[in-house]
Image (tube, rainbow, N blue to C red):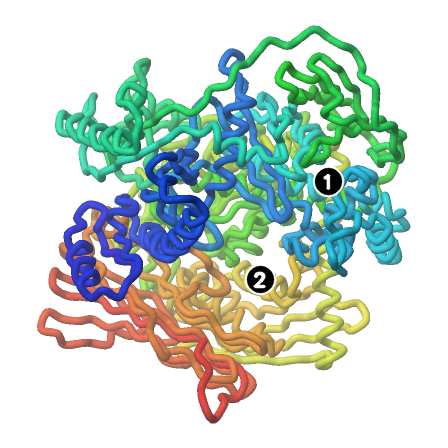
């Protein structure tokens, strides 16, 4: 049983009352309370963590009981029995919860390399690279454990102290594919059974097969444990035959089996570089100043290549590298943590009451370790204060330091991670934490012995494939190597549990402890100006650049999330980041907000044309552009502000980077800048056609402030209600763009400008071809013409006729027949239609293809002027981006008979007063498809933002959340049922203007193939006397204390005729 109540992190009495009743019932093996499991703010991750503890703890208890039965009765009394926690500390078996064990294995590896690789004298930070069969774990250590307090594992948010470990689905068992003109590695895994082809169990082609074919895995040095009877050696010939079969594919381009295998290794290595870049670059660290500690069964095979790709100069392979996670257990510290929530202000020092609480926590933690048998004298106490700026929600756990007070340490870390500090804001304390430690074994670091020269290769030589092709290389046995031996690559070193591949240009020396220290030859050549006669598309490089471009966009997004202030961007993630060619063509868009996809490209292209037109000053180095006008400047709606930065090289623009974020308020007639009843654009807030947010490197605060306040000059209108957050978030967007510029410039120096530009084009062409192939297949099966129509709640039709050329795969999307623009705000500018179509086509392809402008290249649009989808420049459009966009997707998917309608709405809720504005979108039901039930309570199609955690919502805003639950039975029935909508009910704690902008309140989400339609949504005002009033789909009103707004969102349509005997549950 898991018990999690709202705000129990600070008041757990109610959870304890329920737990007492549950104990008296006597029917629960495990009762977990969120207030005890992890007393930290945020109900959702704390609740998930509590559920994980309730589910996993009995499993672990059962295992422990089974383990203990293998020993006599003195085990528990005479032998200290401890287990590794996810935070890298040891805990006794009777104080080991399931939520603490989720990353215990990888945590052992972090402890292992931290204790064996990090040198306290040179203090070079270390990157851990733990590569196993199905995944690779990456982490960082610089003398301090890097703990995080909220992570997502297998889709479950876990709120508990864990070492910051990033996992990527690329390991020795990652499967290999040639598809869509690219080399694909993972995320599917061959697993242990049947495993790779070389395991002799009719397995799948995997990374291990590539290493075997390339001679990097030596069957004669592997145990004979393969085949059906597990008594045969590795089957290299089988793996080679599998690669030979791939050679006939067009993507192979005539490559030999070895060249194919080597290409897959390059792509796999790039996939594993991404989390390492995220660990370092996104936190402000220089990756090239780190040492790479590689371990795990497959890690030493790839470490030198990974280090080369990242520009790292040192690699360390421990003598127990194959079992370093287990070795780390023997070195780990015994740890007991205590934590308590707080709500205090830091005013130059920790309050006296806070110091008392820290002392109490330290006393409690010390007693727990003493109870385990440790001496008080050997216990070290570490104190932490969890701090944040007022008005923000991301707290930073700051350790006590004799050299720096808490506030200075907080500001220093904030500056390093985010690039700025916030002036004029109070520092708040959210938690006090104490970590009591009994230090584990400390290892000696003896000096390097004198050189013994090159050792004898006692295992002879072998043929292995490297970057220059086949090489005859020496093979060494680690047991034959002595401290001081020096070895040059390329070569192979065989360890008992792993194989070390020394790449060309790498030199190894055996340390005094018998470990392998490798120096990697790094190329400092600048390829930016390389000139090539012709660049031909290479599928291996295409895959690598696809990873690199997407990785840059993702890192921009992480920078924006970290540096933003508002709930909208930091919590709800309502933003997108992307890379563009110098003419504004979309190259890579991180998987952020779908409705931004096509619109951002239109915004970039408009700015390029605007500033370079006759009589204007052009775009100079040090300029940053900003816009939001939907009709004139490629925007989506006014709250979505786009910040665009040119990337210069030698005085010329070579690329653009851009970030678009939804600002919670930019003025207008209603708080939140999403007025339900706006009739023209100026009702909806500040309009920016073209402005230089940064000019010559200077942030133009006065100019942008004037623009954001300008709506207040109009009668009945208002300027922005939260200028401070606007400016902070705009600076965060600039910072995100700057991170993208730096990474793009590194890419140009690494490969050359000509190559990077070429692969931007190749990746767009790859996406284009995938869409063309999909359209050809549809035309062949269903004909060359298809039509669909759906209606907005006001009766406005959205009509679409698609005509496909079956030979070329091009198509015309003709929206003739769509209704005229409306005297309201659900008009949608053309950029929104482009975004909805690019999203739909990307979904219809059914495979993971690059998300860029190539998806729209086969499409010709016909959108008649002054219709709902192409309104005049002064028309209201705030609802078009969030309502009409969803209906466009439903129409496109209906034309392709892909799935039933989803909720067709984002259920936009805003509330506020003259002091603030808040905005959120609310989930609903997804439509069912020919092989799946629709998901319940999710965002669909054009948005995928998170909703604000209930405790954050109630802590920051004057509202009470009465209910947030699934709306049972609202999904349409069918062979496959539509997903259910949700119920969300709020009460203001002071008079507020509350507004809802929604659709599907009159017309139901359609079913398909005989499936039933989903339920319509409802917006209800619950008065103080309990009377419910239907407020309609678009409404705004003043709600007082005691009144409530209840929103019931639509369900998704069903697919296929319902079964007669019983209706399937989703």
- In this rendering, does residue 8 appear at all? yes
Does residue 286 lie above or below 274 as drawn?
A: above
Who comes first in sequence, dot 1 or dot 2?
1
Q: Secondary structure at mark 1?
A: helix
Quadrant of the snapshot with the C terminus? bottom left
* Nearest to the observer: residue 589 or residue 731: 589
Does residue 270 lie above or below 648 as drawn?
A: below
The span from disc 1 to disc 2 (Cα, nearest Å) is 24 Å
Q: Which residue is mark 1?
A: 757
Does residue 383 lie above or below 322 as drawn?
A: above
The image position of residue 685, as x and y in percent, is 35, 52
Does residue 159 lie above or below 130 as drawn?
A: below
The residue under the point 26% across, 66% down is 27
Q: Which residue is mark 2?
A: 839
Q: Residues within 10 Å of mark 2 (few under 14, many from 20)?
A: many
The image position of residue 574, as x and y in percent, is 43, 51
Which residue lies most toward the left here?
A: 1025
* Nearest to the observer: residue 911 or residue 68: 68
Which residue lies most toward the bottom here?
A: 1060
Q: Quadrant of residue 903?
A: bottom left
Side (left or right) of 823 relative to 771: left
- In this rendering, does residue 748 appear at all? no
Side (left or right) of 986 relative to 158: left
């Amino acid at each position: 049983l898991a018990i999690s109540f709202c705000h129990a992190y600070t008041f757990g009495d109610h959870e304890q009352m329920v737990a007492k009743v549950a104990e008296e019932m006597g029917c629960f093996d495990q009762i977990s309370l969120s207030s005890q499991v992890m007393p930290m703010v945020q109900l959702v991750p704390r609740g998930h963590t509590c559920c994980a503890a309730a589910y996993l703890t009995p499993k672990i208890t059962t295992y422990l009981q089974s383990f203990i039965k293998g020993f006599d009765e003195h085990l528990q009394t005479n032998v200290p029995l401890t287990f590794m926690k996810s935070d890298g500390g040891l805990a006794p078996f009777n104080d080991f919860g399931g939520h603490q064990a989720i990353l215990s294995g990888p945590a052992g590896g972090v402890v292992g390399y931290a204790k064996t690789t990090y040198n306290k004298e040179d203090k070079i930070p270390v990157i851990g690279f733990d590569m196993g069969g199905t995944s690779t774990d990456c982490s960082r250590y610089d003398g301090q454990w890097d703990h995080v307090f909220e992570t997502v594992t297998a889709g479950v948010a876990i709120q508990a102290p864990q070492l910051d470990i990033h996992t990527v689905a690329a390991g020795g068992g990652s499967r290999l594919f040639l598809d869509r003109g690219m080399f694909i590695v993972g995320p599917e895994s061959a697993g242990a059974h049947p495993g790779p082809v070389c395991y002799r169990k009719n397995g799948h082609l995997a990374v291990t097969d590539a290493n075997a074919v390339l001679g990097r895995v030596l069957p004669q040095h592997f145990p004979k444990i393969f085949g059906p009877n597990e008594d045969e050696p590795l089957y290299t010939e089988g793996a080679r035959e599998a690669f030979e079969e791939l050679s006939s594919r067009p993507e192979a381009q005539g490559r030999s089996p070895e060249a194919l295998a080597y290409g897959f290794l390059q792509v796999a290595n790039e996939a594993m570089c991404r989390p390492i870049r995220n660990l370092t670059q996104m936190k402000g660290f220089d990756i090239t100043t780190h040492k790479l500690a590689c371990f795990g069964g497959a890690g030493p095979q790839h470490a030198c290549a990974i280090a080369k790709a990242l520009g790292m100069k040192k690699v360390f392979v421990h003598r127990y590298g194959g079992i370093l996670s287990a070795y780390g257990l023997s070195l780990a510290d015994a740890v007991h943590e205590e934590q308590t929530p707080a709500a205090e202000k830091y005013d130059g020092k920790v309050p006296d009451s806070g110091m008392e609480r820290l002392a109490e926590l330290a006393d409690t933690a010390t007693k727990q370790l003493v109870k385990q048998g440790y001496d008080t004298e050997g216990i070290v106490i570490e104190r932490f204060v969890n701090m944040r700026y007022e008005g923000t929600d991301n707290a930073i756990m700051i350790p006590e330091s004799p050299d720096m007070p808490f506030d200075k340490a907080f500001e220093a870390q904030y500056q390093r991670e985010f690039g700025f500090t916030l002036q004029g804001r109070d520092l708040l304390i959210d938690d006090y934490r104490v970590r009591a430690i009994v230090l584990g074994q400390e290892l000696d670091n003896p000096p390097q012995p004198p050189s013994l020269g090159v050792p004898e290769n006692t295992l002879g030589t072998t043929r292995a494939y490297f970057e220059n092709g086949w090489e005859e290389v020496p093979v060494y046995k680690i047991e034959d190597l002595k401290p001081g031996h020096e070895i040059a690559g390329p070569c192979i070193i065989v360890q008992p549990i792993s194989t070390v591949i020394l790449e060309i240009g790498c030199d190894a020396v055996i340390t005094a402890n018998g470990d392998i220290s490798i120096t990697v030859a790094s190329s400092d050549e600048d390829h930016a100006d390389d000139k090539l006669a012709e660049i031909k598309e290479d599928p291996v490089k295409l895959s690598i650049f696809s990873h690199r471009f997407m990785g840059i966009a993702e890192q921009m997004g992480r920078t924006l999330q970290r540096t933003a202030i508002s709930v909208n961007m930091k919590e709800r993630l309502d933003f997108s980041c992307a890379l563009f060619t110098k003419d504004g063509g979309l190259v890579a868009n991180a998987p952020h907000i779908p409705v931004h996809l096509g619109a951002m490209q239109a915004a970039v292209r408009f700015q390029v044309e605007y500033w370079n037109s006759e009589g204007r000053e052009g775009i100079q180095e040090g300029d940053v552009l900003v816009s939001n006008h939907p009709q004139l400047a490629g925007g989506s709606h006014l709250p979505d502000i786009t910040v665009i930065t040119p990337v210069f090289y030698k005085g010329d623009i070579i690329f653009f980077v851009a970030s678009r974020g939804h600002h919670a308020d930019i003025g207008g007639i209603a708080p939140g800048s999403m007025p339900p009843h706006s009739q023209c654009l100026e009702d909806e807030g500040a309009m920016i056609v073209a402005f230089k947010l940064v000019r010559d490197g200077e942030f133009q605060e006065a100019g942008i402030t004037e623009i954001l306040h300008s709506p207040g000059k109009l009668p009945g209108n208002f300027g922005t209600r939260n200028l401070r957050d606007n400016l902070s978030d705009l600076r965060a967007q600039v910072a995100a763009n700057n991170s993208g510029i730096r990474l793009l410039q590194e890419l140009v120096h690494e490969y050359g400008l000509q190559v990077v530009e070429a692969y931007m084009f190749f990746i767009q062409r790859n996406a284009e071809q995938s869409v063309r192939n999909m359209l050809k297949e549809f035309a062949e099966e269903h004909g060359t013409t298809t039509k669909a129509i759906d209606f907005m709640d006001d009766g406005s039709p959205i009509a679409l006729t698609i005509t496909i050329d079956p030979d070329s795969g091009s198509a015309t999307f003709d929206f003739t027949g769509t209704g005229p623009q409306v005297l309201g705000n659900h008009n949608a500018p053309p950029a929104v239609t482009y975004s909805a179509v690019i999203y739909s086509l990307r979904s219809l392809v059914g495979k993971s293809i690059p998300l860029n402008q190539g998806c729209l290249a086969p499409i010709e649009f016909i959108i008649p002027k002054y219709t709902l989808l192409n309104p005049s420049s002064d028309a209201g459009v705030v609802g078009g981006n969030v309502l009409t966009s969803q209906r466009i997707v439903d129409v496109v998917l209906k034309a392709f008979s892909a799935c039933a309608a989803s909720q067709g709405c984002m259920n936009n809720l805003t509330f506020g007063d003259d002091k603030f504005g808040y905005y959120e979108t609310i989930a609903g039901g997804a439509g069912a498809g020919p092989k799946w039930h629709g998901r319940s309570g999710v965002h669909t199609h054009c948005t995928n933002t998170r909703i604000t955690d209930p405790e954050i919502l109630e802590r920051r805003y004057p509202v009470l959340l009465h209910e947030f639950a699934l709306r049972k039975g609202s999904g349409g029935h069918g062979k496959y049922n539509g997903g259910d909508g949700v119920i969300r009910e709020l009460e203001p704690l002071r008079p507020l203007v509350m507004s809802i902008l929604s659709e599907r309140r009159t017309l139901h989400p359609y079913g398909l193939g005989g499936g039933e339609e989903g339920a319509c949504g409802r917006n209800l005002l619950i008065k103080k006397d309990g009377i419910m009033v239907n407020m309609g789909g678009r409404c705004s009103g003043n709600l007082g204390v005691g009144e409530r707004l209840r929103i019931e969102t639509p369900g998704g349509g069903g697919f296929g005729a319902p079964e007669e005997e019983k209706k399937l549950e989703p």
